[in-house]
Image (spheres, helix red, strand yellow):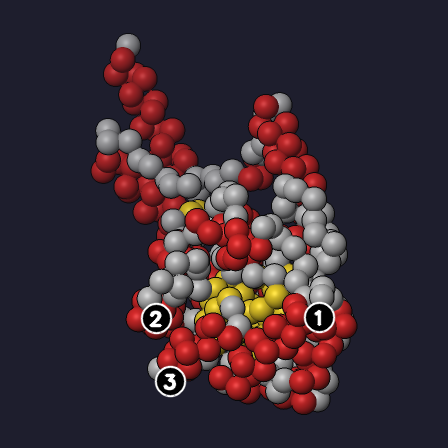
Amino acid sequence: MLLETSSTNNLFALQYLSASTRAGSIRHAGGALEENLSLTPTGGPPGLSRHKITTSSLREHKLHHEPITCLTAYDYATARLVDEAGIEMILVGDSLAQAMLGYENTLSVTMDEMLHHMKAVRRGVKHALLVADMPYGSYQVDPNDGLRNATRFVKEGGAEVVKIEGGEKRVDLIRRIIDAEIPVAGHIGLTPQSVNVMGGYKVQGKDLSGIEQLMRDAVALDRAGVACIVLEGIPREVAAMITAEVGAPTVGIGAGPECDGQVLVFHDILGLTFGPPAKFVRRYGDAAALITNAVQAFRADVKSMQYPSDDESYHLPRETKAGLETVLARKRTMRR
């Protein structure tokens, strides 16, 4: 929202705009005229002691059996609120493809799109460990591209960890990225970037061969030195076995309560998705209804001319108003 001045009588307008500014009637913030900040720090839950979360912090959480919390965020406002609420990890997930960009799945989102959202989230995060999802095609084709794109996430986006889907077959790439001083989060089980190979979003590790492969994948990632391992869409019993076997913290999504931590998509927990939720999603609020009601109320107020009110309007200082009335009276006299 910008305040625009007519090109006619520019000097006159600037004089009175200057007078209004000196009177303290407006304040510029982010290109808008605001009396108050639009985003107020929440302060987090009572008794929350904040410190910067690092990859070492995750290991400490696992060692002391302190559950790790993780949520996705895709923009500044969400990231700031999630961070201030005390969440330990924030993931800029490729799920933004569906949640923010309206794609059918995660496969279409690009590096440039991911970096755009990553930079916005970075500006809102102070305490949480910030993880960037490597999008499909950014590391599968060429390991050199994978290393280059991981570096872009750190240098351009401010990421502290990059997340890569896949187990044993990704180990060489993961070691190269770690050798470049970039921490890596592994991701096994239901890996959304493999949806076409899996034949849909299906629970993995339901038979003995599947369990054996997941165990091999988890151990391989752990030995490669990953900071943590996301376990998605696998039976609770298998996730418990993996969590007990590896030294890296496990973060589950649809993998049961025995994982060292849990991650969900921000939009899912607030009902901001447009389809039926997965079995593992617990909704903690109905932001869709809140937003719809607020938008409808705004529309009704504007249509009925109930918004804005006089109290919600800016006013000229008394002296300026008197001067303006004098000028207008002269103009009316000259037109006669």
Q: Tell me the quarter of the picture where residue 207 sits.
A: bottom right
Decide: marks 1, 3 in contact (CB < 8 A)?
A: no
Q: Tell me the quarter of the picture where residue 299 sits.
A: top right
Residue 48, above or below 1: below
Tag 1: amino acid: Leu
Residue 334, above or below 237: above
Tag 3 or tag 1, which sits nearer the N-term? 3
Q: Tell me the quarter of the picture where residue 79 sits.
A: bottom right
Residue marked by disc 2 = 143
Tag 2: amino acid: Pro
| Left or right, 25 with reference to 212 | left
| Left or right, 90 with reference to 116 | right
Residue 140 position, x and y percent, is: 40, 64
Determine the residue positioned at 70% across, 41% down. 289
On residue 174, the disc is none
Crowd band around label 1 with a 10 angstrom C-alpha radius: few (<14), some (14–19), many (20+): few
The N terminus lies in quadrant:
top left
Q: CA distance from mark 1 to mark 3?
A: 34 Å
Residue marked by disc 1 = 208
Tag 3: amino acid: Asp
Task: Name the residue at the top extreme.
Answer: 336
Residue marked by disc 3 = 179
SS class, disc 3: helix
Determine the residue positioned at 68% across, 37% down. 293
Q: Which one is in front in this view, the residue at disc 1 or the one at disc 3?
A: 1
Residue 291 position, x and y percent, is: 64, 42
SS class, disc 2: helix
Q: Which one is in front in this view, the residue at disc 3 or the one at disc 2?
A: 2
